[in-house]
């Protein structure tokens, strides 16, 4: 049976990197006994331009039917002046919410070939391998009320609401603990239980889930601000980090940048398994739409290609193939090939499509 993949290229460099990921997908189809059926749908700014909304119902419906969504990127200066509810980001947020993709996995790994590209000293980041598990459908992103009202004296008042229930915290904690079992066996939970009551509940619930269901996993807690500091002081102390939607947004950008590989990191957003074991999922490079370099053929396709590797691992149960693809990327970097964003002295500068070609060549060599 063919895997149904929905491709949503979106804006900026999204279409370029996703197009190249499609080539890699073709390689797996030809060489690894897999069948994919792909379809494309509009999301974000391009959807607004062509269909009048950044979050077309049709795209959401198709995404719900697909085995997985491969997402490019959304946003760009062209749409900056649109009202809040028409901005390209709405498309991504609605996909997350409507598909129930509550678990966002953001690995922050430092490729050995790139350890000098980090803004931290190479010895602090060499071998770094952190997994951030970010809650993705709750918290201040979606809490109600969320509004700007007028006060009698003419001022305005803006409210966002940070809200979490026991169930929401339990399920994300379980994802983090389960993943920790497959890695270093440690989870650090970040919240602000000194200031926020949602943080008090977060800490309580994560602690209870850990004690009851995962006594073999070592759990620690850290205030989110302290974690921001520890991530630049000594990032290798972390294995799996679990945190809420907003802290996860911030801490994952920080962690990604300190690997020196910001443009290279993938992500997975997963829903709950239904009674038949079916799990909705979306895979996305974390770099965003990079409008400044869009259309020039220079974007780094690696983050998107590695997002497809995560798709192989988490949606298709093909961990071996995921590892093969990750190894191919590693090999190409070790051989000195670089897109402009990660260019270093003495290396070979290449564009998007050549990078993809090199990765496919490496796959050819590795498969034997
Ligand atoms: C991310 C992005 C999104 C977020 C934006 C584009 C809505 O920053 O995926 O981290 O804030 O979640
Ligand atoms: Mg972000």
Image: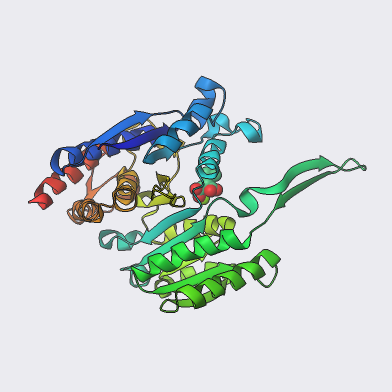
Taking the spot 21% from the left edge, 51% from the top edge, the residue there is 321
Q: Residue furthest right?
A: 153
Where residue 109 appears, as percent x and y from the top left, is 35, 61
Residue 13: give x, y in percent of width and height: 39, 36
Quadrant of the rendered image containing residue 260: bottom left
Q: Is residue 108 visible?
A: yes
- 327 relative to 245 in the view: left or right: left
As drawn, the residue found furthest toward the front would be: 275
Instruction: Work out whether 84 lies above or below 127.
Output: above
Q: Is residue 245 left or right of residue 332?
A: right
Q: x, y percentage for residue 202?
A: 61, 67
- 78 relative to 350, above or below: above
Q: Is residue 229 visible?
A: no
Please say if 166 is above or below 21.
Answer: below
Q: Quadrant of residue 327?
A: bottom left
Residue 220: % across, % down? 51, 77
Judge by depth and name the residue closer to the eye, 365 or 259: 365
Q: Quadrant where the N terminus lies? A: top left
């Amino acid at each position: 049976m063919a895997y149904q993949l929905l491709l949503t290229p979106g804006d900026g460099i999204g279409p370029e990197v996703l197009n190249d990921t499609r080539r890699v997908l073709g390689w797996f189809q030809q060489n690894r006994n897999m069948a994919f059926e792909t379809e494309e749908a509009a999301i974000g700014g391009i959807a607004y331009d062509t269909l009048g909304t950044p979050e077309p119902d049709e795209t959401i419906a198709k995404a719900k039917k697909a085995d997985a969504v491969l997402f490019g990127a959304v946003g760009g200066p062209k749409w900056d002046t649109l009202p809040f509810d028409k901005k390209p980001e709405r498309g991504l947020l609605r996909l997350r919410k409507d598909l129930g993709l509550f678990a966002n996995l953001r690995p922050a790994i430092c490729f050995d070939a790139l350890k000098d590209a980090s803004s931290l000293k190479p010895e602090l980041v060499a071998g770094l391998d952190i997994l951030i598990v970010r809650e993705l459908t709750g918290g201040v992103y979606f809490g109600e009320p969320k509004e700007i009202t007028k006060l009698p004296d003419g001022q305005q008042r803006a409210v966002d609401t940070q809200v979490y229930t026991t169930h929401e915290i339990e399920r994300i904690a379980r994802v983090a603990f389960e993943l920790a079992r497959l890695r270093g066996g440690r989870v650090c939970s970040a919240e602000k239980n000194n200031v926020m009551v949602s943080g008090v509940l977060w800490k309580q619930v994560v602690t209870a889930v850990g004690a009851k269901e995962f006594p073999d996993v070592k759990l620690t807690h850290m205030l989110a601000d302290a974690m921001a500091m520890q991530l630049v002081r000594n990032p290798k102390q972390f294995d799996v980090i679990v945190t809420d939607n907003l802290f996860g947004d911030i801490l994952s950008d920080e962690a990604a940048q300190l690997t020196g590989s910001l443009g290279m990191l993938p992500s997975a957003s997963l829903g709950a398994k239904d009674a038949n074991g079916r799990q909705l999922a979306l895979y996305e490079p974390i770099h965003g739409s990079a409008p400044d370099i869009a259309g020039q053929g220079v974007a780094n396709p690696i983050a998107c290609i590695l997002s497809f590797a995560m798709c192989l691992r988490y949606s298709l149960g093909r961990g071996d193939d995921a590892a093969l693809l990750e190894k191919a990327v590693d090999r190409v970097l070790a051989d000195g090939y670089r897109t402009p964003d990660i260019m270093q002295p003495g290396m070979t500068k290449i564009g998007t499509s050549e990078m993809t070609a090199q990765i496919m060549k490496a796959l050819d060599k590795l498969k034997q």
